């Protein structure tokens, strides 16, 4: 036979193929529909205040390092104006609204967020550097889901607390971080409003855009003035807000260090406070687990949102017998991660949120290496401008290593091995944090045994970084106080009174 | 002989869902369409396949679409053993291989001797590739050694012809069974593992193919031998085909993006690929009426 068939011989091992170089072309998300202003003031009492050049600060697009827009840093006077507006609204109009009426507003917000989801997703990615795949598929839909969920509770509070009546707390001061800007805003505002409170919220200084855009949405749906007020600024503004004498509640999500400072500063005040702070989650991988799927889980646990996740599974604890195999599989999988432009639909890992954060990550990895760790980085190229960090593994670390003890908040995974179940539990718990952990095993009984011994607010089994508005979220130990989400999330925004004791 | 490897169905589905969010546009799409055509086993497996139908199929395999230049030929035509000689006659001077199903296709419910005879007959008629079916009944009742022996004897009977082993994943019941059957077929000497006969629903699905690709990858990592993969049945649109290519690229790497290691078993996929191709070139969709059905 003279034909040139694909196979000329049947010996498999000598068979040669000429692989085709097939890479994905750029697939940029359309941004033309997402508009925003160059300069922003605050949102107080239902309208935007004037941008003030003398108090301005820049917000950088981390994907290219360029200025995206400018904000005004709120002074003590500005914060006071916002708190006053919230107070007036709480004592006046808003307190006359029934639960049903409040729920109508929350449903409107939720539906409007869904309608404008693509716009919010694009802005979130521009401002914070997260890949559009995540802002589009996770951040914005989840934010809308939170408003839907708490809209449902607003007129059913009597059923949330059997035998008790609930009253709103009053004016809530809320401070949120830069890793999930709109989602954290939803976690804070939805339950507060459902319970009848008014709020003053401060977004993080690097990611104010979606919070300010959200105010436009509030104007569109006609939320009464002063119910939601937004002030922008950095730590100083936050300090003015938490120290304001006329607030009734503090809800803070951010670093453990700042959380401790706030707790100290309110020690002598009668004020309720909830905190959602740092974490150093363990991803416990047993040798009987489905390893391929576990590796996918690791990718999701540590590289989701560039590792800027307080509940990230940043410590891999893998059973010794499968450690080499898992590391090989992981390295292989990491070669297919695409690091780059957050607005490209194929990007898996976007830009690090800020230059400051990039330097923190670099410093931690350098410390890790100095303390004896081996470092493996994804080999793909990084964009020339902007703040990027490649997905990284640190092996050869031990429990006392700085990188194992402290939260890096970047795409850096430390890998330790263990031999027995009890050793895994001990290592997982041996940290000041207690936000989240993951267990990977094919054996159900092991999940229950280990799960009951782990000291963390969340334990995921055979999955990681799954969020749902119905499920409470919060920390043990230095990871926080109080819960957000679910019925537990309502507790943080009400005073409970035994039925009969209330007029 | 073969370990049972735990598979987490939810995890597999999530990985597949993520693969399906890849956005393949313009040049990379054209390249994918080109690949999909060159990887195609154009198939007709009907009891009613006439001589005319086979001629048409072979002609389509040679010249998928004459209106545009540079449209590649497909990898192979896939027919029943008694149509191999005719296809061979038409395609003997081309680069297109003749694949033939054998071994009491599609059920495999016959004696080993008859299956071997079936293979000998197809090979003697000129088949370059044999698509065999495993004995699912034996596999499900735990007679793994029997299934293994059958595959290795059929491999021997193939001689120089390449062996694709059809697992008929729609009858295996679980992803763990599919993984086990893949490992078994690979160990027994399969050149390719293939999902389905196309006669049972569900045929090829992405979760199933991912599990099979993982078996191929693990085997490659431990032995260095590259086994091929052929999803068959149920793949009708270019979009699906491209998603499979992404799955292969991100599980096995670009080495497998070649007709010698990856095939699509399909009958109606070709026309959709051609239609997308024309659309990418001209910016307009053509009516399906412009593409011959077989």
Image (tube, coloured by chain):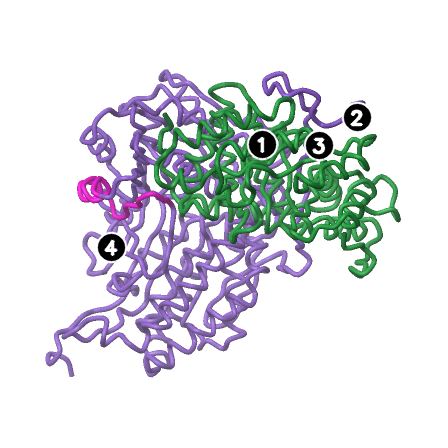
Give A476 or A297, whichever is nearer the viewer: A297
- For the record, the magenta segment spans A445-464
Q: Which residue is mark 2?
A: A3
Q: Which residue is mark 4?
A: A482
Q: Which mark is residue B117?
A: 1
Task: Indicate the chain on which mark 2 is placed.
Answer: A
Task: Indicate the chain on which mark 1 is placed.
Answer: B
Tags 4 and 3 touching, CB below 8 Å: no
Q: Which chain is purple?
A: A
Element on which disc 2 rests? loop
Q: Position of residue A72 (x, y in %)?
A: 52, 55
Q: CA distance from mark 4 to mark 3?
A: 76 Å
Q: Which mark is residue A484?
A: none
Q: Position of residue B46 (x, y in %)?
A: 65, 51
Q: Position of residue A288 (x, y in %)?
A: 30, 33
Q: Which mark is residue B125?
A: 3
């Amino acid at each position: 036979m003279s034909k040139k068939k694909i196979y000329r011989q049947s010996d498999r091992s000598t068979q040669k193929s000429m692989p085709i170089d097939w890479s994905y072309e750029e697939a940029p998300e359309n941004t033309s529909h997402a508009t925003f202003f160059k300069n922003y003031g605050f949102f107080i009492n239902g309208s935007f205040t004037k941008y003030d050049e003398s108090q301005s600060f820049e917000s950088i697009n981390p994907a290219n390092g360029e200025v995206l827009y400018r904000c005004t840093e709120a002074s003590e006077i500005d914060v006071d104006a916002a708190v006053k507006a919230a107070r007036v609204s709480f004592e006046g109009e808003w307190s006359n609204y029934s639960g049903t009426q409040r729920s109508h507003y929350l449903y409107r917000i939720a539906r409007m967020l869904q309608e404008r989801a693509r716009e919010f997703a694009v802005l979130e990615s521009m401002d914070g550097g997260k890949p559009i795949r995540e802002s589009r598929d996770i951040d914005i839909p989840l934010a809308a889901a939170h408003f839907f969920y708490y809209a449902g509770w607003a007129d059913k509070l009597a059923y949330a607390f059997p035998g008790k009546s609930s009253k709103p707390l009053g004016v809530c001061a809320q401070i949120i971080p830069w890793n999930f800007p709109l989602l954290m805003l939803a976690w804070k505002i939805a339950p507060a409003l459902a319970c009848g409170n008014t709020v003053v919220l401060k977004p993080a200084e690097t990611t104010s855009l979606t919070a300010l855009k959200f105010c436009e949405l509030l104007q569109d749906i006609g939320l009464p003035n002063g119910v939601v007020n937004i002030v922008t600024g950095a730590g100083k503004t936050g300090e003015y807000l938490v120290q304001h004498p006329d607030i009734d509640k503090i809800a803070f999500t951010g670093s453990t260090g700042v959380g401790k400072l706030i707790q100290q500063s309110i020690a002598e005040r009668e004020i309720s406070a909830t905190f959602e702070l740092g974490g150093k989650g363990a991803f416990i991988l047993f040798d009987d687990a489905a390893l391929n799927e576990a590796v996918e889980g690791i990718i999701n646990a540590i590289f989701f949102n560039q590792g800027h996740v307080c509940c990230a599974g940043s410590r891999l604890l893998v059973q010794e017998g499968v450690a080499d195999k898992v590391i090989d599989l992981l390295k292989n999988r990491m070669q297919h991660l695409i690091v780059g432009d957050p607005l490209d639909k194929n990007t898996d890992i976007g830009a690090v949120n800020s230059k400051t954060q990039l330097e923190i990550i670099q410093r931690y990895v350098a410390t890790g290496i100095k303390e004896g760790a081996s470092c493996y980085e994804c080999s793909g190229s990084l964009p020339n401008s902007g703040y990027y960090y490649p997905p990284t593994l640190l092996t050869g670390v031990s429990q006392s290593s700085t990188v194992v003890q402290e939260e890096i908040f970047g795409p850096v995974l430390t890998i330790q091995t263990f031999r027995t179940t009890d050793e895994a539990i001990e290592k997982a718990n041996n940290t000041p944090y207690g936000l989240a952990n993951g267990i990977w095993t094919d054996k159900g009984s092991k999940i229950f045994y280990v799960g009951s011994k782990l000291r963390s607010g969340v334990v995921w089994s055979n999955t990681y970084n799954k969020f749902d508005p119905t499920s409470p979220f919060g920390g043990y130990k230095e990871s926080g106080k109080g819960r957000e989400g679910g019925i537990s999330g309502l507790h943080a925004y009400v005073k409970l009174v035994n039925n009969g004791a209330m007029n | 002989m073969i370990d049972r490897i735990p598979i987490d169905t939810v995890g597999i589905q999530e990985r597949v869902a993520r693969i399906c969010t890849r956005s393949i546009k313009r040049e990379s799409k054209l390249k994918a369409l080109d690949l999909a055509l060159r990887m195609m086993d154009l198939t007709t497996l009907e009891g009613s396949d006439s001589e005319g139908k086979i001629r048409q199929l072979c002609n389509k395999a040679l010249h998928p679409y004459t209106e545009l230049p540079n449209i590649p030929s497909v990898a192979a035509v896939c027919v029943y053993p008694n149509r191999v000689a005719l296809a061979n006659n038409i395609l003997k001077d081309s680069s297109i291989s003749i694949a033939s199903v054998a071994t009491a296709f599609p059920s495999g419910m016959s004696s080993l001797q008859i299956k071997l005879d079936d293979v000998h007959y197809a090979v003697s008629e000129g088949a370059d590739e044999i698509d065999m079916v495993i004995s699912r009944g034996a596999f499900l009742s735990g007679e793994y050694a029997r299934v293994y022996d059958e595959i290795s004897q059929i491999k021997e009977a193939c001689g120089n012809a390449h062996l694709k082993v059809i697992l008929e994943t729609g009858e295996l019941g679980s992803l763990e069974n599919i993984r086990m059957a893949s490992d078994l077929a690979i160990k027994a000497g399969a050149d390719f593992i293939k999902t389905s006969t196309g006669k049972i629903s569900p045929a090829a699905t992405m979760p199933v193919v991912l599990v099979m690709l993982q078996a191929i990858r693990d085997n490659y990592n431990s032995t260095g031998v590259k086994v091929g993969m052929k999803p068959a049945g149920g793949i009708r649109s270019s979009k699906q085909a491209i998603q499979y290519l992404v799955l292969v690229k991100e599980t096995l790497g670009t080495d497998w993006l070649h007709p010698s290691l990856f095939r699509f078993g399909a009958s109606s996929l070709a026309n959709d690929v051609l239609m997308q191709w024309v659309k990418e070139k001209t910016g307009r969709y053509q009516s399906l009426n412009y593409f011959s059905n077989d």
